[in-house]
Amino acid sequence: MKRIALLSQRLANQIAAGEVVERPASVVKELLENSLDAGADRVEIDVEQGGTKLIRIRDNGGGIDKDDLGLALSRHATSKIANLDDLENIASLGFRGEALASICSVSRLELVSRAADAAQDSAWRVQAEGQEMQTAISPAAHPQGTTVEVRDLFFNTPARRKFLRTEKTEFDRLEEVVKRLALSRFDVSFHLRHNQRSIHHLQTARSDQEKQRRVALVCGPAFVENAVRIDIEASGLRLWGWVSLPTFSRSQADLQYFYVNGRIIRDKLISHAVKQAYQDVLFHGRHPAFVLYLELQPSLVDVNVHPTKHEVRFRDGRLVHDFLFRALHKALADVRPEDKLAMQTVRDGGGVDPETGEYVPPVAGPTAGEFAGQERIRFAPVSYGGGSAYSRPPADGNGFSAAQVAEQINAYAELAKDDEVPPLGYAIAQLHGIYVLAQNRNGLVIVDMHAAHERITYERMKAAAQNEGIRAQPLLVPLSIAVSQAEADCAEQQAQGLLELGLGIERVASESIVVRQVPVILASADIEQLVRDVLADVREHGSSERIRNYQDELLGTMACHGSVRANRQLTIPEMNALLRDMEQTERSGQCNHGRPTWVLQSIEQLDKLFLRGQ
């Protein structure tokens, strides 16, 4: 073993660079955070060859004084914190003072800056290049703000350069960093260019509409069209942003942006809360999409737990977890058919005239064809001859005759004259014993009657179970389980909370517990494995939903078997009753398995199918 010796400054910086500077995207993240902390409201990013050849970031922030330029490239030099109190109340994105020094050690860096209070011609340039990073300061011409130019990344560490991917892959990751920061600061404009080609030009967003427009530009218009805007505040916490409807899900978790006090993070506690909120409305194997912002006192969250600042630690993790779960759960439960119809109406470009209540399709453009002048078809009474095959019900009795359909359409017309038409309209027919066809003011509503009835039954059973609480029964022979000391401590500390879940657990030794009571619905389950899972959840997240989830799973199975089955003939009143129940039931847009229960074919969509107005 060699003698202990201090590392050289260059080697120490390159070790730090291994933590902070993984690839060009890491450089862009650190430099953009510095620009935002400097108060910039306009940032320009120029990149060449995916960032390996050149990264140039220009901002109009507060700039750096001449006397601080050389120090800015030193390790552990920062203007953002000065004492322990500052560290416990961090309001800036960066604070470690390692980024510029780490970047310098693996690239050729040039920084030009003019401070806000400096004279018109008092801009200065500082340059550093790998090795010992000796700096040279010279005068320069530059407006207020700072420009950082990073060339030949990893030129002096060829082993690190070998681990870089293709130019496209590296730029895609760099672009994702810009998107994340653009979503965190709506008050800043971002302009990204790659190889002299403009990729993104995001203007400052002040109003809610402008913010939503930026979200659409970054995440895609389909996300905004299928997202619910939320803004909830409680217990000193505020959650706002956009969450997607369960029907708009992704095969991967690639459209999930979560910010804590403006800092994007990926945290297990937050992921768990979001997953629970979508538990019984999301199709298996799919992932929700969201852009969410959590605001709380800086002293209640510790951001100094990871070199790249992607993880945080909350002082009261259980409070944050429960707040996120309840806020998202309520937001998804409150979505009713009328809300989804409003989203689709905006998406299709049409609308409902508030004076007449009639649907107004989009106005045909100047290129409309010969059919542009035709009026929308309106249903009228139709008479059918007795000998027509369509006037007779099918031999198996599954379906409606054309005369019955025409009669129901006319009945709808009469109801629509006098009454306000409900969001899902009125039933007019049943198709193949599976789908209910209904007509509302917007167009044609198609309902999967089994899926819809399954959700209605499930929600009613859940409400009844919650009112009764979790019933428990004592075990005839108590079950002894050998656990770790940490698990035994958790069981002892959380005994009252576990009892509320129906689990009666008593500690009998330092590494042994006895289960004396279990929920009635779990009498046939693997009690030992369940207890271990519940204790693991409580230790990790401060609570456990396993018993509730198991109960919901059983209720979902019962609801599935107790709902109307395919090929069952429903009367018109029964179908209308089903539609009215859907309008009043939480999460009625999806069945228990996450599949959609109804869809709308608007007049505009039907017109497109038949080329009307073209």
Image: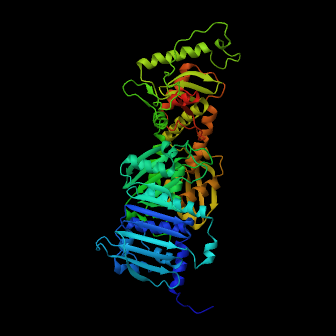
Q: Quadrant of the N terminus?
A: bottom right
Q: Position of residue 3 (x, y in %)?
A: 58, 93
Residue 212 visible in rendering: yes
206 relative to 282 in the view: left or right? left
Q: Position of residue 554 (x, y in %)?
A: 61, 41
Q: Nearer the viewer, residue 400 or 106?
A: 106
52 to 491, vertically: above or below? below
133 to 296, vertically: above or below? below
Residue occupying the point 53% across, 20% down: 573
Q: Nearer the viewer, residue 305 or 540?
A: 305
Q: Nearer the viewer, residue 216 or 520?
A: 216
Residue at the far right: name it: 395
Q: Position of residue 593 (x, y in %)?
A: 61, 41
584 relative to 63 in the view: left or right? right
10 to 492, vertically: above or below? below
Residue at the far bottom: name it: 3
Residue at the far top: name it: 386
337 relative to 112 in the view: left or right? right
Residue occupying the point 56% across, 91% down: 4
Residue occupying the point 61% across, 63% down: 483
Residue 266 visible in rendering: no
Q: How is the image coloured?
A: rainbow
Q: Nearer the viewer, residue 585 or 526?
A: 585
Q: Position of residue 607 (x, y in %)?
A: 54, 28
Q: Quadrant of the C terminus?
A: top right
130 relative to 477 in the view: left or right? left
What number of labels is visible?
A: 0
